Amino acid sequence: MFKREHEGKLYDLKEEDGKFAAVLRFNYKKDTMRNVLEGDFVACENFFSSEEKKYYTLMKITSIFPRHYALEAIKGGGYPTFLREVVRNIVEDWDTDTSTETFVLATASPVGYDLVNREQKVDFQRGMSKPMPGEDVGILDRNTTREFLSWGIGREKIEIGKFRRDPELEVFVNLRKMLRRHFGVFGSTGTGKSNFLAQLIRTILQYDNSIKIILFDIQGEYLALLADVLYDCGVILLNEDEITDNLRRFLISAERAENMDQSNETIAIELSRTSKKPGKYEDNPDPFVPYFRRLLEQNRIRILQPSDELTFRYIQEFISYLGDQIGTSANKRNFFRAFCREIRRRGIREEFTERNVLEIREIAQELSHREDFLTGKGQLNTHVNQLFSIIEHLLEDIEQSFTPVAGDSTTPIESVVHDFIINERGERLCLISISEEIEIRRALSRIAEGAIYRRKRNPTFSHDVLFVFDEAHEYAPARGTEEAKQEGVDQSRKALMKLSRQGRKYGLGMCLATQRTTYMDTIIMGQVHTFFAGFLPRKEDRERIGEAFNVDEATLIEVQEFAPGEWLLSSAVATGLTNVPIALKAKDSEEILEEFFKKQGFITQETGGGT
């Protein structure tokens, strides 16, 4: 169970924020400070042990320091010459394993689980038992750590990285629980947030081919980072006002087919030069040319066509929505019933067409002239007129959806909802790359609201959908700040709140990712049940995570030493270990991209350069 080469003792217990912190002491050896580190899981026997079963309180080391008795003795000061001599002499003691003057002092926090050993069979159970002061403390060995990391996670698990303290051990999450109960990725600039988020998306799509993902990319980072995924199963939606003149002419020109091959190549080269690329590819855009060329050839780079209101593809959705608008008015209810009866009588059903939109408008207009819906002055009843106006307005929007603004390279918002929320086939990753904050907030609110509405009306859905919001503070900033007053924030915040509270009922998951945790709305953050925290040097960022997830400072302290690609995972539902912090090292998306480019022949095996 334990590593025998580094055993310690439980030196003391201290009360800390309603819990306890353990003070551990290890004998000093030359390699102790290299092999006993922050993040190690340790165990100490507790008071529940019996002859048949041994119970050990599991803890995680949060800090560790070398100590020397001579230095402890002179902390109060002394004669300077004497102090210098003491300091000079103790250096020699660090070079020997037999010195009685040196030791290692560590602090550890309980993780909320006990290790149970019965007849050399290891199991784990929830508990916050106090360990016995003076008892031995052991560091979990590799096999026991592996069992602990995968305990209680269930079958539907995916590997998301390697255990930071031992790269031979995998770290898993339960995919469905992580998605449906929402997750967050929080890290400061330089922590590799986008790289890690791209790898999470890649892993999810590779594991389960029924899941679809809609990614809102305000910084334009994922056109390149997810090139391998988009190449196989993705579509890119752009804002017409932000693209280059050449790309705009290409996408909206009805004559582009005349020189399609030449146009594709020209635009692909332009996109590879102008798009934001990761690390090693900043000065080497050539591998992205054939990637963009393929997407252009297959019409998978498109313009997102804005829509001011919710539109409908199916007659029944339209009818159901109208039914929600009736309220308590008897006149509205009678008009609605007559409207529905006439639609059924004429056999209008299934999807909207340009023809049946005209028929439905004709029905509404005929009913608006019936005497029982008119006032004594021959005018339409006020309440009925409200419903009639809603019908007219919705039918206008549906009509417009039959005529794309720019041609077959535009995608209405309603089509995004249909293709990713309703339709289980087709592309699996929708990348919405818009840098204009107001426009992307509008797109977010309409797509998220539309998704919830569709799933409510058809709760027997066939697939899960994950919404990923990079730079999430742009959509739901902290309340009471200047950012919260910006245009479109109220709508996007409302949509995120609804998605966070209702989405899991309908297979709609949410991921919040941001480098500016301090500026996030903590109410929405609090709906997230799994989080990944990277390098967070600012205390206020750690405090914001602590506030949202009820995590103490000791749990987050180790992230201050994280390198890019290292993440602290904690989950109430997805790891099998409730709220146990697990430090992991993730795969590098740039390395995955390089493998993809080599496999496709976009770069040479020897040099890594473009073909």
Image (cartoon, grey):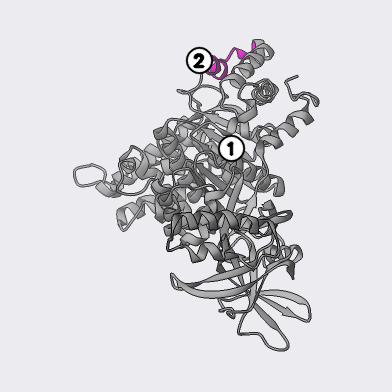
Residue at image location 58% in from the left, 48% down from the top: 465
Magenta stretch contains residue 58:
no
Task: Give the image location of residue 473, x and y in percent.
Answer: 42, 43
Residue at image location 78% in from the left, 78% down from the top: 120
Which image quadrant is residue 429 in? top right
Residue farthest to the left?
377
Residue at image location 61% in from the left, 48% down from the top: 566
**Residue 297 in view of the camera:** yes
Name the quarter where the N terminus is drawn: bottom right
Q: Which residues are magenta?
A: 246-258
Left or right, 435 with respect to 195, comes to left
What secondary structure is marked by label 1?
strand
What's the residue type where badge 2 is placed?
A: Asp
Left or right, 473 with respect to 607, comes to left
Neighbour tally class for label 1: few under 14, some 14-19, many 20 plus, Cα within 10 Å: many
Q: Is residue 411 above or below residue 55?
A: above
Task: Give the image location of residue 5, x and y in percent.
Answer: 74, 66
Task: Give the image location of residue 27, x and y in percent.
Answer: 66, 67
What's the residue type where badge 1 is placed?
A: Cys
Q: Which is nearer the eye, 62 or 599?
A: 62
- As measured in the structure, the alpha-carbon distance from the residue carrying label 1 to the one carrying label 2 is 23 Å
Task: Give the image location of residue 600, x and y in percent.
Answer: 77, 28
Magenta stretch contains residue 249:
yes
Residue at image location 36% in from the left, 48% down from the top: 478
**Residue 528 in view of the camera:** no
Circle 2 residue: 245
Circle 1 residue: 430
Neighbour tally class for label 2: few under 14, some 14-19, many 20 plus, Cα within 10 Å: few
